[in-house]
Amino acid sequence: MIKVKINGQEQSWDGDPDLPLLWFLRDEAGLTGTKYGCGQALCGACTVIVDKEAVRACITSVNDVAGREVTTIEGLHPNGDHPVQKAWRQVNVPQCGFCQAGQIMQAAALLMDNPKPSHDQIREAMSGNICRCGCYQRIENAVHLASTGV
Amino acid sequence: MNFIDNPRRLRGFEKHIRVEKVSRRSILKGLGITGGFVLAAPVMSRQALAYETGAGKMPHGVVVDPRVFVSVAPDGIVTIVGHRSEMGTGVRTSLPLIVAEEMEADWSRVKVQQAHGDEVKFGNQDTDGSRSTRHYLIPMRQIGASARTMLEQAAAKRWGVAATEVKAVNHEVVHSASGRKLGFGELAGDAAKESVPSVEGLKLKDPKDFRYLGKGQVGIVDLHDITTGKARYGADVRLPGMKYAVIARPPVTGGKLVKFEPEEALKVPGVEKVMQVQGWPWPSKFQPLGGVAVIARNTGAAIKGRDALKLVWDDGPNGKYDSVAYRKELEEASRKSGLVLRKEGDADAALKGADKVIVGEYYIPHLAHVSMEPPVAVADVKGDKAEIWAPVQSPGGTREDVAKTLGIPEQNVTVNVTLLGGGFGRKSKCDFALEAALLSKELGAPVKVQWTREDDIHNGFLHTVSVERIEAGLDKSGKVIAWRHRSVAPSIASTFAAGTVHQAPFEIGMGLVDMPFEIANISCENPEAAAHTRIGWFRSVSNIPRAFAVQSMVGEIAQATGRDQKDMLLELIGSPRIVKPNVKDLWNYGEPQDSYPIDTARLRKVVELVAEKGEWGRKVPKGHGLGIAVHRSFVSYIATIVEVAVDDKGKLSVPRVDTAIDCGTYVNPERIASQIEGAAIMGLSLAKYGEITFKDGKVQQKNFDDFQVVRMDDSPVVTNVYIVPPGPDTPPSGVGEPGVPPFAPALINAIFAATGKRIRSLPIGKQLEA
Ligand code: FES
Ligand code: FES
C-alpha cells in the first residue's frame, strides 16, 4: 500500500506501484486537471509539483512519490487565485487550453525558484512545455506579470 | 462494409465535392420543429442583409430560432447555446456574444451551454473551414434581435403601451416616457409566450451602439475553468463503471490483423480484457482501422498491456510506401503536363518565347496535426441507444456515423461535445468515437478509448505531401508574361474513394487556380498522384504548399530581377480588380462569388498595411533578413513579414513577425490576434521541423522527439497583428486558418535575404547548417 499526499489529502494505492502518477491522478483519483500529451516527458502537459519541484507525472511512478507531497492544478490555490493563474487570465493566455495546466504548474515552480526571471530564463524554463496552439508570447507575458505582481 | 459504396451520405466529402447532392440536401429536411421557425437557406435575403454566404448549402443549413438558442430564467440568467465546437478559436464565446450583443443581454449574466450534436435542431455544426463567424454572424444577430423583440413585446403588453415605446437596454426593458423598467428575468415567462417575429421585420442594432462586437474586451467563457483545471475535455470524461481502452492498430494503412496473443497482456496488473476491434477496408472515410483493444481499470495499465501484446499484421497494398521514392515520383510527375484546370492565354508558347524562365520545384512533406489532446472518446452503448462524449469538430456527422456503424437510428444517438484540446482538422474525423462505440457495445459498459501520442502520429489522417512546380516566364523588361503551376499531391478525396488520383475542387481552389496575379498567360495543372495513407484536412489544407510555392516564386523573381520583394509582389498582384479565373465551377470556400470575390484591392491593402506597420525595408542587423508573403484563403486576406536571424552555425531564430489580416467584419479582435500569433508558431513549426516520412508503409516518427514542434525557446519573440477595419457591409471571413499559409514563404524569403540561400524543400531542418 503506497501513501501519497495529493493537494493536502492522503491517498493510497495498492495496485501496480509502477503505474505512472499521471494515470493514478487522472483515472484513479479523478483529478483530471493534469493532462496527457505525450507520455514521454516531451510536452509538459502532465506537469505537477512534487514538494517544491516541477515534475512530469507521465514518467514518475506512484511509488516514486510515496510519502511525498504532490500538488496538481486543482490544488495550486483554493480559489484559483495563485498569481500565475491570475496573470494567465489577465493576459488571456489560453487558446484550446489543454496545455495550460502544465504550463501554469511549470510557471509556478519557476517563480518559487526564481521570483524575477528574465526573458531568457522564462523562455528556457518553459521550453519543456509544448503549446500546439502557440500561446508562447502570452505565456511569457503572463509569467512576467505574475513575477511583478498581478 | 465500405461506405463509399453506400448510397447514403458521405458526409464531409460530399459537401465539398458533390455540389449537386449538397444543394439537394440543403433543401432543409426536418423543418418541422414545432413552434419555432427554421429558415430555408439562405437566411440572408440580399435586401435585408447586404450579403449572402454559403451557410445554407452546408448539411442542414442554418437555424434561426431564439427558442432553440436562448432561454431566460426568472433570476435573469440568460443561457445561450453554443452549437459549434471549441478547439481554441474562441467560437464558444464569440457566437453567444453576438446573440447577447443583439438582445442587449449583459454578458456577466450570460451562461453558455454547449449544444449536443443535432443539426436538425441547431443547423450545421461542422466546425471547420474557418466558417463559424462568416456563416453565423448574421443568424446569431437575428436570433438575438428576435429574443430582444419578444422581451420588448412582453414588457409593452404588461404596461399597456405600444411596443415602439419600449426599448431593451442592458438586461432590462425600459419605458422611458414613464421611467418604468423590467428586468429580463421578470419578463422571461411572458416573453416565452410571445410569437417569434419574422426575420424580415427584425431591426438589427446600429453597429455604433455595439457594446461587445468588434471590441475584444471579453475573455473566453472557459478562461477560469482552464486556469484551474476544471475545464472538461474529451479526455476528462468519467462515468461510473467506465473501462479504459487503448487499441493496437494496423501499422500500415490498409493492413489487417493476422493473429494476436493476449496472454502476456492479460498478466499486466489492472488489465481486464483483450479484444478484437472491427476494422473497415481502406479507404472507408472515417471508419475505424480495427486492431486489438486492451481494456483495463486505468489508461496506464491499458498502455502497458498493449505493449505486451504479440501481434502479426498483413501490411496489405501500401506496405511498400516509401517517402524517398514517392517524392521522386511526384517530382517526375510535376515535370510533365497534367490535367489542365485553368488556362488563360498560352503559357506553353509564352514560356518558350520568354527571355528568361525561372523554375521552382517546391516540396512539402506529410504533416501530423498533433493536437495537444490526442484523439479520445467515451461511449456508453446500451441496447439500441448510444451516448458519446467526445472532442469532435463534427458533432452532427459523428452522430450519423455512430448510428450507421452501430446500425441504430440516429435519434437514438446522443453526442455530447466536450472542449477540444486542439483540433486542426484531425477531430473532423470521428473514427475514435466510432471505436469507443464499438467497444462499449461489445463490453456492455461505458468505455474510454485513449489514443497515445504514438497512435496519433502513426494512424492519423495526415496532411498531404506535395510537389508544386512553378515556371515563370519573363520578357526582356523583366515583366512576368507566363505562369505555369503544376501541383502534384494525393487528395483528401482518396480517403473516401479508392482510385482517386486527382485533387478535388476544394483542394485546387486553395491557391492553385485562384492565383490572383495579373499575368497574360497562365496554366494551372494537376498531374496524377495516388495516395498510400489516409489523407485528411489539416489547418489551412492545400493553402500551405500553394502559398509556400507561389510566394517563394515571387521572392525568386525579385531575386532574379534585382527588385524589392514587396514591390515585386505588388507588381504581380497588379491593378485593383476582381479576379475571375478561367476555371469551370471555381470553388470559393463554399461562398458565392458575389459576396466573396477575389479582390486584389484587398490583397494589395494587406501588403501595404503590413509593409507600413511592420516597417518593411528597415535596417536589420547582420545575419538578419526580412521576408514578405501574402495569401488569400478562407476568403480572408493576410500578409506577413518575418524577420529571421541566422547565426554562423546556421541556427535560425525569429525576432519579429508582423501580420496584417483583412477578415471583413469581425467579432473579437483579441481572439483574432491569438489565432494569428498561434498561426505564426504553427507556420514556423512546419517550416522548421514538420515532416512525417514513411518506410515500408509505416510512419517513421513517433512522438514529439522526432516530430518536433516549436517550443518557447525558438518561438518568435514578438508577433504583431494588424486588423484591417471592415467597410460597413464587408462580410466576415475566415480567421482560424488563413494565418498559417503566408508564414513559411515569408520566412523562406527572409532566409534568402539573410543568407542568400533559397530553400525549396521543407522542412528547413539542417539545410542552413554548414
Ligand atoms: S505527458 Fe508528460 S510530458 Fe507529455
Ligand atoms: S492552448 Fe492549446 S495547446 Fe496550448
Image (cartoon, rainbow, N blue to C red):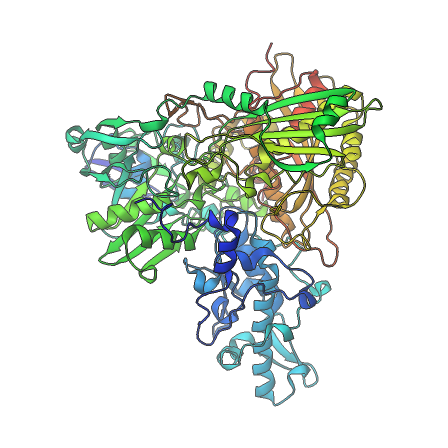
Q: Position of residue B272 (x, y in %)?
A: 17, 39
B239 is higher (above) or lower (below) than B62? above
- Write down the quadrant of residue B534 in the picture: top left
Q: Is residue B116 above or below residue B313?
A: below
Is A3 or B356 nearer to us in this picture? B356
Q: Nearer the viewer, residue B450 or B7?
A: B7
- Which quadrant contains ligand 1? top left
Give the x, y percent position of residue B692: 46, 26
- For this orientation, the residue located farthest to the top is B770
> Residue at point 38% right, 53% down?
B8
Q: Name the image quarter holding the N terminus of chain B.
A: top left
Taking depth in this image into account, of B317 and B261 the one nearest to the observer is B317
Q: Residue at 61%, 32% (x, y): give it.
A: B525
Q: Is residue B574 left or right of residue B202?
A: right
Q: Tell me the quadrant of the picture where the C terminus of chain B can be found.
A: top right
Q: Is residue B439 above or below residue B193?
A: above
- Give the x, y percent position of residue B457: 41, 31
Residue A144 visible in the displayed image: no
B640 vs B292, nearest the viewer:
B292
Left or right? Give the position of A109 relative to B139: left
Point out the residue furthest to the right here: B477
Total labels: the figure holds 0
Kindly tell me whether residue B245 is visible in this rendering. yes
Place residue B761 in its image quadrant. Answer: top right
Relative vertical location of residue B650 with respect to residue A41 in this rendering, above or below: above
Instruction: From the top left corner, tell me how far across and down residue B234 is, in percent.
Output: 38, 47
